[in-house]
Amino acid sequence: LAAKTAHGIAHWRPELCVGQLRLAGCNADLGLPDLKPEEAKAKGAQTMVIGVANAGGVLSPAWIDSLVAALDAGLDLASGLHGRLADIPAVAEAAARHGHLLHDVRHTDQTLPTGKGTPRSGKRLLTVGTDCSVGKKFAALAIERALRARGVDADFRATGQTGILIAGSGIAIDAVGADFIAGAVETLAPSAGKDHWDVIEGQGSLFHPSFAGVSLGLLHGAQADAFVVCHEPTRNRMRGVDVPLPSIEAVVETTIALGRLTNPQIRFVGIAVNTAALDAQAAKDRLQALSDEYGVPAVDPVAGTADAIVEELAAQGLVTLDGT
Amino acid sequence: LAAKTAHGIAHWRPELCVGQLRLAGCNADLGLPDLKPEEAKAKGAQTMVIGVANAGGVLSPAWIDSLVAALDAGLDLASGLHGRLADIPAVAEAAARHGHLLHDVRHTDQTLPTGKGTPRSGKRLLTVGTDCSVGKKFAALAIERALRARGVDADFRATGQTGILIAGSGIAIDAVGADFIAGAVETLAPSAGKDHWDVIEGQGSLFHPSFAGVSLGLLHGAQADAFVVCHEPTRNRMRGVDVPLPSIEAVVETTIALGRLTNPQIRFVGIAVNTAALDAQAAKDRLQALSDEYGVPAVDPVAGTADAIVEELAAQGLVTLDGT
């Protein structure tokens, strides 16, 4: 999980990835060739991305030598951490010396408004979660893909550093000033054509004691017409804290209760489960059991597809599909 | 309301205020002498405080001449707006020229942690609201005063610019990065002696579409043992947006439901009503009606005192008062 930024980019943009650089003792493996910066440069790499995502977004001093080595080898750097690359003197000096770029995607220079809650046109789907790091970004990307495959005009809207690196744009909601969470989402997913869908990447969980404020501002700013609950079935404590996971039912009820403030029509349309830790039969049984219990499709959008969620949107009258 | 920063300082720290400076067309009046900066300096003023609080915390270009005039007259400046005084070239130049200080109290240079939700010792009371600007800061200050008057060890904890200017310290929660809302409150009101009370200034409302994320992170970080709902009875739309006010009942239920995540023992202990717009009999009737309806004291903590709320804390077994 600590390498989820790296994993997300490698999964969704494999054509852009030429290799990985791992420090001694690293247990993560993207299945990409291990390359030194100069080898990566020779293979066509332009940028080294810091692939770690930790709570608080802290940049480790142990990484600085590698960052400088990448700049020395001719690469730009990209980071999604809260700290800025340009604030590390050794990194700033090396970048200036070589004329290379430092991309701090978690920071926006945009002046953001406060949220207004005024109803806007277009449709929006938000992925929410029983915890952090349970597949909200992957689910949103899979739903965008499934909507487009059925002829629906849809855009993934990135709200976190990895999503921004995958999509090429977005706003890291967790790094904006607290007053501007909802306003940032209104800016990121503005008024659109009535049949257009923005599929908005969720953050955190309404039940996570560190980050619930971010999740609530995101829900209000999204004015979500539909939401999908994302879940990791082997997790029993919330990430980084000593708090049990909420039930999917609690997440559904609370999301509807709080989401109604800015969209009284908010609807629950599916469950996205990360079944990677289950064997094939257990995964299939789990998805079927959840679907039976909640009356909406339960899918693994990575191992499978999100098409059943698109069908559910159609069944609830939210989209019209070609040929239906 | 737009001058609530000025009003808060004048009300709670009158001994520190020598005058007011009002631009042409200003309808606010603190009842202080209108002074030019040089007159204020002659009367002992050290700092000119920007007394305006607007949504988004924007500094108007129309104020710059007055800010520079204050610096030229020998005063420091203090601001609680989101923008920094030092980022205004004319102001920065004048401050540097005279060697005067620019205090941007909405910004903290502290590195904040993410919230953990780990139970901590000491007691905490949070003021929450049916809207922004309904008296949460005044109620918290009045409750601190009432607790101290009854011999209880209590500290007001400021979470907004005006509170910080009144208390002399605090963290402007609405300006911290969204990921750090709860963590900032854990830092602001840390573990304390078991009978110590932190009285934490609330922000926004769980029902305000612009700022509910701030309010939720604040509730979770506070691990509130007790909360007081603040209300302005003549308000019927939420400030700055086209959304009706929630009922006090809805605020109580939602605060308990969401607050339980970090403090399962959270309790509703009172209602603070700003009755300034009502005549004396109507105010008295309203407070009695609310008290009867909700079964907790309803007080106007400014026109009256918050002592009934302290009595309620004692009745619920949360504090032991001298002589009881």
Image (cartoon, coloured by chain):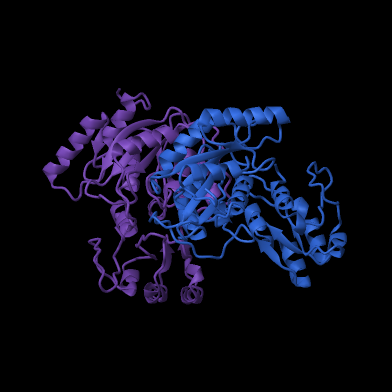
Chain colours: A purple, B blue
Numbered circles on residues, count: 0
Residue B98 horizontal/vertical position (percent): 78, 71
In the displayed structure, would residue B138 be above or below residue A225?
A: below
Is B180 left, or right, of B238 in this rendering?
left
Query: Quadrant of the rendered structure where residue B130 is?
Result: top right
Residue B305 horizontal/vertical position (percent): 65, 43
Residue B113 horizontal/vertical position (percent): 45, 61
A59, A14: nearer the viewer: A59
Residue A15 visible in the picture: no
Q: Residue furthest left?
A: A281
Q: Residue furthest front?
A: B323
B126, A104: nearer the viewer: B126
Residue A255 visible in the picture: yes
Is A318 left, or right, of B49 in this rendering?
left
Query: Quadrant of the rendered structure where residue B49 is?
Result: bottom right
Quadrant containing the N terminus of chain B is top right
Q: Residue at x 48, y 65 (%)?
A: A84
Residue B93 horizontal/vertical position (percent): 75, 67
Q: Residue at x 25, y 49 (%)?
A: A236
B250, A322: nearer the viewer: B250
In the displayed structure, would residue A69 be above or below residue A55?
A: below
Q: Residue at x 65, y 59 (%)?
A: B84
